[in-house]
Amino acid sequence: MFQDQWGNPVTAANSEAVEALDRTIMAYLGFRLDTGAHLKATMKADPEMPLGLIFSGFFFLLFCQPKMHVRGLAVRDTARAVVEGGTVSMRERHYMTALDSWAEGDWGRAISAFESILLDHPHDPMALRLSHYLHFYTSGGRAMRLSSARVLPFWTMDQPGAGYIQAIHAFGLEENGEYEAAETHARRAVEINPADLWGIHAGAHVMEMRGRHREGIGWISAHEQHWASGTNNFRFHVWWHRALYHLELGDHATVLDLYDREIRAESTEEYLDITNGTALLWRLEQEGGDAGNRWEELASRSAERVTDHLLCFADVHYAMALGATGRTAEAGDLLEGMRNANVDETSSQGTVYRQVGIALTEAIIDARQGRHDQVVDILLPLREQFALVGGSHAQRDIFERVLLESALAAGRTALARALSAERVDQKPASPYNWSVHARAMELAGDGPAAAVARHKATTLAA
């Protein structure tokens, strides 16, 4: 039995494989393009290394694509045979349970396995990062925050990857509404490693939620030289955050430039890349911007994925692109598949589809077709369940915006006024919030209040 660089037990044929797996983990934590190359080196050094096989399985599952899921299942089967046929540590058995559970759709059991690892091995960055991912798409901010809080005291700044642990904790804090502490940890992470995309991302979220748009632009731009090359597609999501700042400031030209030059410079099939594009164009059009023909590319990519049903968050965004381009047949296929997929009661995503995802997707399609009363009737009772879909507060805000815009369009005066009042109270530095509040006050016939709100929006964007 060997040990990795964090002192965790590792079953391997040789130290070369262990060292290669260490490099794989560090590359994965850094969203680096060479993650796959390091994993290949690991498996070349030891083709039957239990954790090498198990981590390969996780990487396939993270794509949330059926073709990759099938490959993940095959690797899972190989890993299971190796684990059951050999002598491995309890840590590695927990990892096997996590892979098996995740592959079969039981994300809650997978999370429990990761958290069991962390109880005995708080210096296991891979278990923390993967549990962080699953918490993000299930139970959200509080679970993320507690998961990293349980291990953070045992990390010192001189340990490999310590900055990444700071970044993980920063994001959990931010999603839990603890913005000051989140920013402290995000800045600490980036000081340790200026190329830490998750740390930069966590800081960007803090500035987004606190309405510090110009500062957010500067934060992302200042570190661009460190992360713009050598990192994987997640860099597009960081650019998406910068585009949100420019959108708040009314700079539609820069939003579209970032979209064309960075966010969708490549027509990728990655679910996060597609959700970046759909959520941004939808917001842009809500604020009077012109998306041109950009929806077509997103709709074509979304149409390719209407039968996936591995992640509800992604499916809802595919519906946005299909609805925006009037592709009603594909949108109908997407909805029908969501109704019939993941019916097993142990499927975590199946529960999400049934509780909120199907209805939310129906509302998105209704909104695009002008059925705004139906949108309000669907979404208003579901507001407290939006978080079940996963994603961040910033990402899920698109659903709140759809509800509010439909309330305005349907002439639901009292509701629109109430919803817009909530927004300016929660985020008073947002020009969009004041602008939509002005529209609500106009609808209510309160001209003076509408003028005040409009002036506030203009002043904030200037």
Image (cartoon, rainbow, N blue to C red):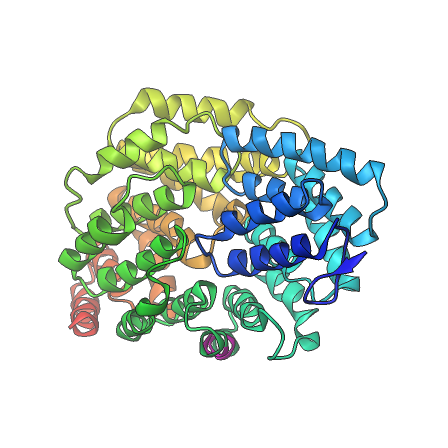
Residue 55 appears in view: no
Query: In front here: 30 or 291?
Result: 30
Residues in magenta?
Answer: 183-188
Left/right placement of residue 252 relative to residue 101 reads left
Of residues 138 and 23, the one drawn nearer to the viewer in this rendering = 23
The quadrant in which residue 43 appears is top right
Q: Quadrant of residue 334?
A: top left
Residue 170 place in picture, x, y as percent: 52, 70
Would residue 198 appear left or right of 50 to someone viewing this image?
A: left
Q: How far across and how far down the image is residue 349, in percent?
A: 58, 37
Left or right of 312 in this view: 261: left
Is any atom of residue 219 visible in this view?
Answer: yes
* Quarter occupied by residue 326: top left
- Which part of the image, by quadrant, shows the C terminus? bottom left
The secondary structure that dominates the magenta segment is helix
Percent position of residue 164, x then y: 54, 68
In the picture, the quarter occupied by the N terminus is bottom right
Above or below, comparing residue 15 to residue 204 in the picture: above
Judge whether residue 187 is colored magenta: yes
Up/down of 86 relative to 414, above or below = above
Q: Please provide percent x and percent y for residue 35.
A: 51, 52
Residue at coordinates 37% horizontally, 64% vertically from top-left?
A: 227
